[in-house]
Amino acid sequence: MMTTQVPRRPWLQRWHVKPIAWTLVILILLVASSRMTGVDVGMFFGNLGQFTDLLVRMSRPAWDYLPIILHPLYETIQMAILGTTIGAAFAVPFAVLAASNLVHNRWLRGIIRLILDLVRTLPDLLLAAIFVAIFGIGSTAGVVTLAIFSFGMVSKLFYEVIETIDMGPLEALESVGANKLTIIWYAVLPQIMNQFVSYFLYTLEINVRASTVLGYLGAGGIGVFLQRSLNEFNYSQTAVIILATLVVVMVIDGISNHLRRVLL
């Protein structure tokens, strides 16, 4: 009776050399980067006690502070919705012009993508500081900042989705003499509407969190109250603000999941 011998694996696979080597490379890069940037890892672990103390202070939220922050939280949601909607509305035509499968003019496509790259390069805190200086302290500066941030983000994600669509419906409409607007409306938008709604709500979720930070610069919203509670070391009020923002983000995430199921 003949017995079949199982071929032995190469020693690289037997000893898992590749995973071990990649792990060592990553560790070496982490150590080298921490030394070059001056990051003190020991200080991080040495101050864990302060971090734990901070969490203990925030574990007792001051729920009586909740009615005070409801209106600023509502203002933050309004800022996020308005800024995201304006930015996404301007992002749609720019994304169409930046898609290589729809626009074959390299110069036009290159200029549009350069503009989008410049918009994404500007930090939102820098934009908020500029618009606070222009429009003054208030929600107007926050809305404009979030609109520009949303424009850069949504347009990038949107034109990448457009470049992956099925070109069959486009070619069918072109063969019967349809114009560009008709092709985009009936052949492009139906294929990307689901992703567009998902990206819109994802950007809205990011803007809700970003608007709390923009309040530090006077851009309105709940960020002003967050800054005040941190400056006063009132971490129980800070906990309420964080939990309220978390609830808003969870609601937006639930709406996004529901709309995604409906559109599929």
Image (tube, rainbow, N blue to C red):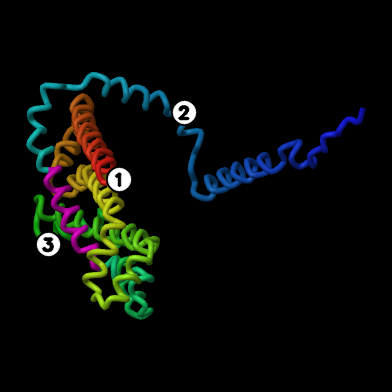
CA separation in Å, label 2 and label 1? 50 Å
**How much space separates mark 2 and mark 3, taking CA atoms?**
44 Å
Which of label 2 and label 1 is nearer to you?
1
Magenta stretch containing residue 77, yes or no?
Answer: yes
Seen in the picture, residue 160 relative to 254 is either above or below; the reply is: below
Q: Nearer the viewer, residue 225 or 91?
A: 91
Residue highlighted by disc 3: 134
Counting every numbered tag in the picture gives: 3
Q: Image quarter for residue 212?
A: top left
- The amino acid pointed to by label 1 is Leu
State the quadrant of the C terminus: top left
246 drawn magenta: no
Q: Residues within 10 Å of mark 1 (few under 14, many from 20)?
A: few
- In the rendering, at what x and y percent does residue 66 appear? 12, 27
- At mark 3, the secondary structure is helix
Vertical side of 104 occupied by 35: above or below: above
Residue ID at (64%, 44%):
22
Q: Residue 264: which numbered mark, if any?
A: 1
Q: Residue at x 40, y 23 (%)?
A: 49
Kind of residue sitting beneath label 3: Ile
- Residue at 36%, 75% (x, y): give it: 110
**Of label 3 and label 1, which has the lower sequence position?**
3
Question: Which label was assigned to residue 46?
Answer: 2
Task: Specify the segment rendered in magenta.
Answer: 76-93
* Residue 101 image-quadrant placement: bottom left
> Gap in Å between the C-alphas at discs 3 and 1?
43 Å
What's the amino acid at mark 2? Answer: Gly
Q: Foreground mark, 2 or 3? A: 3
